[in-house]
Amino acid sequence: MIQPMIRLAIWGVSARQKDVIQEMHRLGVLHIGQGKGPRGEDPAGLASLRLLRSKILGLVESLGWSDWAGITGDSVESVEKLMSGLSPEELTHEIEKSLEEFAVRLASLLKEKNDSEELLARLKKGKETLDLFASFFRHGRTRESTALWLVTEENANGAVAALKTAYSARGEGWEGRVHFVSGKDAFGVLGVRIPRGLEGETGKILTERKALPWDLSELCPGVSAECRLEAVEKRIEELSSRLAVIAADLKRTSSEWGPRLGALFMFLDGKTEQASVEAGLTLSPNSFGLFGWIPEDALEATVAALKEKFGDDVLLQWRRPEEGEWGRIPTSLKNPSLSAPFELFLKLLSPPSYTGVDPTGAIALFFPFFSGCMVGDIGYGAVLFLIALKLKRNAGEIVRKIGSILLAVSLWSMAWGAAWGEFFGDTGHRLFHMEPLWVERSESVTPVMAFTVALGAAHVMLGLLIGVWQGVRNRQRHQWMEKSGNFVILFSFIIGLMVLKAELHGAFFSIPIILLIVGLVLLIGGGGIGGIIEAFGSFGNIISYVRIAAIGLSSAILAMVASSFMDVFGLSVLGVTLAVMIHLLNFVLAIGGSGLHAARLHYVEFFGKFYSGNGEEYKPFQRRSGSSWKKQ
Amino acid sequence: MEKAIIAIAAALAVGIPAIATAYAQAKIGTAGAGTVAEKPETGGTIIILEALPETMVILGFVVAIMLILRFA
Amino acid sequence: MILSQKSADESPNYEYVNAVVRARAARLLGRDVFLRLASGAPEDLELFLLESQYGPRYREQLATGGGSLLGRIENALSAGTADLLLDTALLARGETFVFICLILSMGDLHNGRILLRASPGPLRQKNSPSWHRYALADTSFYDDLWRKHATPAAGAIRCHQEDNDIARILGVAYMTLHETGDLFRAERSFYSGWAEWWRKQAATRKNQNGRRMAEYLGRLTDLWNFSIWLRRGSKEEGEPEYFTGGWGFSKEILQSSRDMEALFASSGWKDIPGLGEGRAESEIFRSFQRSFYEWQRRLYRKNLLGIDVLLGYSARAVQEWKNLSLIAVGASLKMSPEEIAEHLFLPDEGTVKVRD
């Protein structure tokens, strides 16, 4: 259900303003209800606090540290103690000063890492090319030097011919002097091994053919061409080990500074939030006023805490909200422990408005019922029960909630399993002569389908009734007229069907006809032509519940197929393995499919009749925790 | 022979809408996944949109069952 | 080089990427926000950026960047825009990926042009210019070219070493510059090499999206040809050489048209504000650019299951970066809000304001 909220106003003397805001931040129950105050602009310190907060978060992100959950309240409080009594300006100055050296060191470390990684990538690429000419570099001939040239394939051929002529004219041997590696376009790399003294002539020949010297000197400056491959290999090795050192240094810095900066950030975040609330206060020269919304059951403790801490320095006023305020009141849900886990279903939607309806109770009732009806197997239900118990012991809150939901589904699965007479399909029947309490759904399809349609009619009509109630409560005439018209029309069809089935006298038909006319009037009065379309939609919605029978039927048949492997292969390893595997597949399909379709029946068919989801979530003014930093 | 024709009719009644539903759901689902990845608050709306084409196959199923029960 | 990271043969996923992009587009800034920021100080822009989608990059600048306020803002904006667009590209598959790469490759075109124009080296400043960081080739590649490869010959070799298609196209342009010393020819070689390469990619997809990308390249070519047409007569060697593959301007029309009205009359380009009103050519060129941008922006709402959405989104994202950078520079130069607004391409603005 939606918790009743109270409007709490706190008035006090300006001298206690900061303390009151700090205390409300600590208590973490007040949903602030005021925006910018009469001052309109942020106080001077707030902008610098925001910048500093971001800078620290930037440092944390640059460090790659993210263990926010590891920061305890104590570590934030110790920062708080250290910084207490400082004005925002002093605070900013102090923190900036203390982080100056660290920020510079981190920036230079990160820059070196970046530059080294880029250089390493280039060196590796350079080495790939040099490797293609490795034999030129590794012969260690001192009489000869090696050069690489970038040249088009066409020009390379001409250059090679010219070089051959020039070398032969000087009596130099030609074999093994050139090697051309073509690239992915017109250009390629030409490697030339040149006798010393012929460099000039070679260069001239190649330049004439528009070749460019492939010089990797910027990667290994001051190294002769012959030694480049060796130098590049050495440099790659050096850089790799330097990068390892930098990575280790960063890791150490991260583990050392991360938690400190994290705690500092959390402290500053609180301060910034407080300063921003302060900026929105209602002010007179010597006093301030703060107001917001608080759940009714937290009022007593909050008032007591404020009275104890501030005594007569603050004046507290509280009252129930007035009708004109309904649209601005945040929504906070509170349900009994059995149905509370089903609040998860509303997380996918915007919360209901304060005067709306919390459907959690209805979901808790119908979801496991529908889902269990689809699974409908004592054996599957028992396995699911064990899984649910395991999940309920998990540390994560959401996983525990899912465990609770699955527990309810498993109980209903077992109940429905008894009704359909299924225990791992027909295994129960084969082994223990188990009989269905109601019908065998794989045989008697019609009654199951009729039942699910009836179930759908009840569910959809409940949704419509909630819609009517909501419309009346919020004084929305169109809504309650449309929903009630829709309801009456559905009802008239049900009565008509009953009259038809019971073969009553024709005069009884006047009842559904009158109801139909009343319904149409209400429907058109409330929703116009759109209302009539919605009424048609309601019939479609009801038929949609046939899926409960359809999915149940397919699950039951697949389970029987699984067991029939035992008939084919007998009680052999193969037979048992195949049976178990098909049952496993069916179990997964049944759980997944039933959950998904039961959820869909709620989201589409049920919620569609009343849920508007235009509420504002209750967000108390408090220190944020854990994972919420990651969303920054 | 007649039974075979009825079986084929039932299979078509559920098969063709199933293909149409699968096609529509694949498109909507892909787009829905993209939207939810950016705006998780749209999850409920996406489920509704994703569920809409299912009506086709549910109606197909009802028709198939009716064909079998009535004529087979 | 992002293009080599994925296979182009997978089936496209326009539905997914477009849904992500349309959800993200809600965070793009509206006209009012630009105008509000234009009337504020750079410090206001700084606080605004912290809460915006450029927040993570601005925090990075605050933590490790140092430098001036304007420098921080410019760096954060260009890196933030690159994050938006490159992240989107990484979500794409197959044809979707190829075409989004084409859109991003506009950044390579800009960066390559900056490099060619700053060759040879002595013209260059020590610090790298503001690169279009969303480009396909890494920013480190362009930085390296800028800082360590000042001559066209060195640039050509460095491009060949990079071993990817975009770098090769730039390498050929560098080679042209090295061999001829003619910047105009080098730029022309770069533009036509780039456009031809992408035209081939678009031509392999014979569907609506392939045709749209061919139209995009054609319209872009029109823009280049129009800028050549505006310079006709400034060269003494006779008729200028136009790029082939234009969308609205045929070579014949470009060669025969003596005034702008005649040029645009049968081109298919509409809504060029100021045309026929005796405006300066530079203003008409800006109007034409604006018209090209508006065409892309409008595509955002056209085919929701095709490349149109991505074309529209990318144009808006890049324009947002340019607008915010202009605001930052304008505010730091203490320009009046009206003066700054005059230089912006604002969203939801039907026509372009042209100075009277």
Image (cartoon, coloured by chain):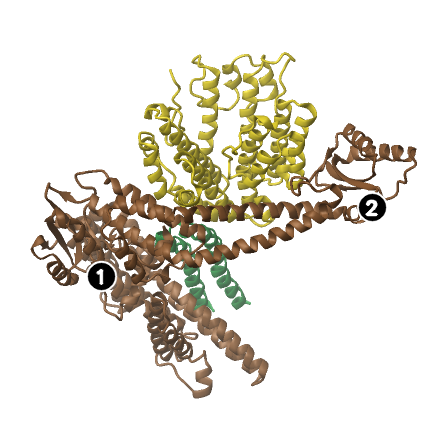
- The amino acid sitting under disc 1 is Phe
Query: What shade does chain A have?
Result: brown
| Most distant residue in the left direction | A312
In the depicted structure, whether residue A480 falls above or below residue A418: above
- Out of A37 and C229, give the one closest to the viewer: A37
What is the spatial separation of the Cα atoms under label 1 and label 2, in whole angstroms?
Answer: 112 Å
| Most distant residue in the bottom direction | A432
Which chain did the image draw in green?
B
- Relative placement, left or right, of C209 versus A34 is right
- Out of A324 and A602, give the one closest to the viewer: A324
Residue carrying label 1: A509
Residue C91 position in % (x across, y down): 50, 49
- The amino acid sitting under disc 2 is Arg
Tell me the tag on residue A141: 2
Q: Chain of mark 1?
A: A
Which chain did the image draw in yellow?
C
